[in-house]
Image (cartoon, rainbow, N blue to C red):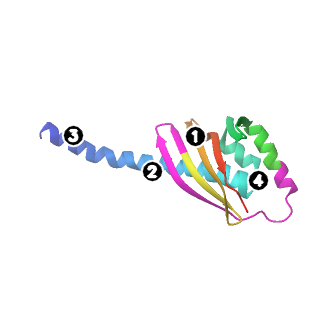
Protein backbone atom coordinates (compact mmCIF):
# COMPACT_ATOMS: atom_id res chain seq x y z
CA UNK A 1 0.00 0.00 0.00
CA UNK A 2 1.40 3.39 -0.90
CA UNK A 3 1.91 6.13 1.66
CA UNK A 4 -0.92 8.17 0.13
CA UNK A 5 -3.31 5.24 0.46
CA UNK A 6 -2.25 4.72 4.10
CA UNK A 7 -2.97 8.37 4.89
CA UNK A 8 -6.39 8.16 3.22
CA UNK A 9 -7.20 4.94 5.08
CA UNK A 10 -6.13 6.44 8.41
CA UNK A 11 -8.20 9.57 7.77
CA UNK A 12 -11.22 7.44 6.92
CA UNK A 13 -10.91 5.78 10.32
CA UNK A 14 -10.08 8.86 12.40
CA UNK A 15 -12.36 11.54 10.93
CA UNK A 16 -15.67 9.87 11.85
CA UNK A 17 -14.46 9.41 15.45
CA UNK A 18 -13.33 13.05 15.57
CA UNK A 19 -16.68 14.23 14.19
CA UNK A 20 -18.56 12.13 16.74
CA UNK A 21 -16.47 13.60 19.59
CA UNK A 22 -17.08 17.12 18.28
CA UNK A 23 -20.83 16.46 18.06
CA UNK A 24 -20.78 15.12 21.63
CA UNK A 25 -19.03 18.28 22.84
CA UNK A 26 -21.58 20.51 21.09
CA UNK A 27 -24.43 18.57 22.70
CA UNK A 28 -22.74 18.71 26.14
CA UNK A 29 -22.31 22.49 25.80
CA UNK A 30 -25.97 22.88 24.80
CA UNK A 31 -27.08 20.79 27.78
CA UNK A 32 -25.13 22.97 30.23
CA UNK A 33 -26.48 26.18 28.71
CA UNK A 34 -30.06 24.84 28.69
CA UNK A 35 -29.93 23.63 32.29
CA UNK A 36 -27.87 26.35 33.99
CA UNK A 37 -28.88 29.38 31.95
CA UNK A 38 -32.24 28.83 30.23
CA UNK A 39 -33.78 26.80 33.08
CA UNK A 40 -31.70 28.06 36.01
CA UNK A 41 -32.03 31.76 35.23
CA UNK A 42 -35.16 32.20 33.11
CA UNK A 43 -37.57 29.26 33.27
CA UNK A 44 -37.21 28.11 36.89
CA UNK A 45 -35.24 30.82 38.66
CA UNK A 46 -33.13 28.19 40.42
CA UNK A 47 -29.70 29.31 41.71
CA UNK A 48 -28.73 25.66 42.33
CA UNK A 49 -29.05 24.96 38.60
CA UNK A 50 -27.04 28.09 37.89
CA UNK A 51 -24.23 27.09 40.24
CA UNK A 52 -24.08 23.61 38.69
CA UNK A 53 -23.34 24.96 35.22
CA UNK A 54 -21.59 28.28 35.81
CA UNK A 55 -17.97 28.46 36.96
CA UNK A 56 -17.52 30.18 40.37
CA UNK A 57 -15.34 32.84 38.67
CA UNK A 58 -18.08 33.62 36.12
CA UNK A 59 -18.59 37.24 35.09
CA UNK A 60 -21.44 38.79 33.17
CA UNK A 61 -20.43 42.09 31.57
CA UNK A 62 -23.28 44.60 31.38
CA UNK A 63 -22.97 47.64 29.10
CA UNK A 64 -25.25 50.49 30.14
CA UNK A 65 -24.91 54.09 28.97
CA UNK A 66 -21.33 53.45 27.83
CA UNK A 67 -20.23 52.04 31.19
CA UNK A 68 -19.22 48.40 31.62
CA UNK A 69 -20.24 46.71 34.87
CA UNK A 70 -19.13 43.19 35.85
CA UNK A 71 -21.66 40.99 37.67
CA UNK A 72 -20.48 37.93 39.63
CA UNK A 73 -22.28 34.60 39.77
CA UNK A 74 -23.04 35.21 43.44
CA UNK A 75 -24.66 38.59 42.71
CA UNK A 76 -26.67 37.30 39.77
CA UNK A 77 -27.84 34.14 41.55
CA UNK A 78 -29.06 36.28 44.47
CA UNK A 79 -31.11 38.42 42.05
CA UNK A 80 -32.56 35.34 40.38
CA UNK A 81 -33.45 33.82 43.75
CA UNK A 82 -35.13 37.05 44.90
CA UNK A 83 -37.11 37.30 41.66
CA UNK A 84 -38.27 33.69 41.93
CA UNK A 85 -39.38 34.24 45.55
CA UNK A 86 -41.37 37.35 44.57
CA UNK A 87 -43.03 35.71 41.54
CA UNK A 88 -46.71 35.00 41.97
CA UNK A 89 -48.07 32.25 39.78
CA UNK A 90 -46.33 30.46 36.97
CA UNK A 91 -43.51 32.16 35.12
CA UNK A 92 -43.76 33.18 31.47
CA UNK A 93 -43.17 30.70 28.70
CA UNK A 94 -39.46 30.62 27.81
CA UNK A 95 -38.26 29.61 24.37
CA UNK A 96 -34.63 29.51 23.26
CA UNK A 97 -32.76 28.90 20.04
CA UNK A 98 -29.08 28.07 19.65
CA UNK A 99 -28.02 30.06 16.58
CA UNK A 100 -24.31 29.30 16.90
CA UNK A 101 -22.27 26.79 18.89
CA UNK A 102 -18.53 26.56 18.25
CA UNK A 103 -16.27 24.18 20.17
CA UNK A 104 -12.50 24.33 19.76
CA UNK A 105 -10.70 21.94 22.08
CA UNK A 106 -11.54 23.01 25.63
CA UNK A 107 -13.19 26.31 24.67
CA UNK A 108 -16.69 26.98 23.37
CA UNK A 109 -18.84 29.95 22.43
CA UNK A 110 -22.61 30.01 22.14
CA UNK A 111 -25.02 32.51 20.63
CA UNK A 112 -28.52 32.02 22.00
CA UNK A 113 -31.77 33.83 21.19
CA UNK A 114 -34.11 33.96 24.19
CA UNK A 115 -37.85 34.59 24.03
CA UNK A 116 -40.04 35.24 27.06
CA UNK A 117 -43.82 35.23 26.80
CA UNK A 118 -43.55 35.13 23.01
CA UNK A 119 -41.27 38.19 22.83
CA UNK A 120 -37.62 38.19 21.77
CA UNK A 121 -35.86 39.58 24.85
CA UNK A 122 -32.15 38.69 24.63
CA UNK A 123 -29.39 37.72 22.27
CA UNK A 124 -26.81 36.11 24.54
CA UNK A 125 -23.16 35.37 23.86
CA UNK A 126 -21.82 32.82 26.34
CA UNK A 127 -18.23 31.55 26.69
CA UNK A 128 -17.49 28.16 28.22
CA UNK A 129 -14.44 26.14 29.16
CA UNK A 130 -14.20 22.40 29.70
CA UNK A 131 -13.01 21.56 33.24
CA UNK A 132 -12.33 18.10 34.73
CA UNK A 133 -15.96 18.05 35.96
CA UNK A 134 -17.41 19.19 32.60
CA UNK A 135 -18.30 22.31 30.65
CA UNK A 136 -18.89 25.50 32.65
CA UNK A 137 -20.12 28.92 31.57
CA UNK A 138 -17.37 31.44 32.39
CA UNK A 139 -18.70 34.66 30.89
CA UNK A 140 -21.67 36.33 29.26
CA UNK A 141 -22.35 39.45 27.24
CA UNK A 142 -25.77 40.18 25.77
CA UNK A 143 -28.03 42.46 23.81
CA UNK A 144 -31.40 43.17 25.41
CA UNK A 145 -34.17 43.72 22.87
CA UNK A 146 -36.91 46.28 23.50
CA UNK A 147 -40.11 44.60 24.63
CA UNK A 148 -43.25 46.51 23.78
Q: Which residue is mark 4?
A: 45
Does residue 56 appear in this view? no
Q: Which residue is mark 3?
A: 7
Give the mark toward the camera: 1 or 2.
1
Q: At x 71% / y 46%, what residue is drawn?
A: 50
Q: Earlier in the sequence, mark 3 or mark 2?
A: 3
Q: Spatial distance from mark 1 to mark 2, Cα to Cα?
A: 16 Å
Q: Earlier in the sequence, mark 1 or mark 2?
A: 2
Q: Which residue is mark 2?
A: 23
Q: At x 51% / y 51%, what residue is drawn?
A: 100
Q: Earlier in the sequence, mark 1 or mark 4?
A: 4
Q: Nearer the viewer, residue 117 or 84?
A: 117
* Image quadrant in which the N terminus is located: top left
Q: Is residue 11 above or below residue 120?
A: above
Q: Spatial distance from mark 2 to mark 4, Cα to Cα?
A: 29 Å
Q: Nearer the viewer, residue 101 or 65?
A: 65
Q: Which residue is mark 1?
A: 128
Q: Position of residue 125 (x, y in %)?
A: 59, 45
Amino acid sequence: MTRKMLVIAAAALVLPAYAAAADADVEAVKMVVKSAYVDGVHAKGDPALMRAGFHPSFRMLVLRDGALTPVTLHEWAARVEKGAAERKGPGPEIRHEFTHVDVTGNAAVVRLELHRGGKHVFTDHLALYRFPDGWKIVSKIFQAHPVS
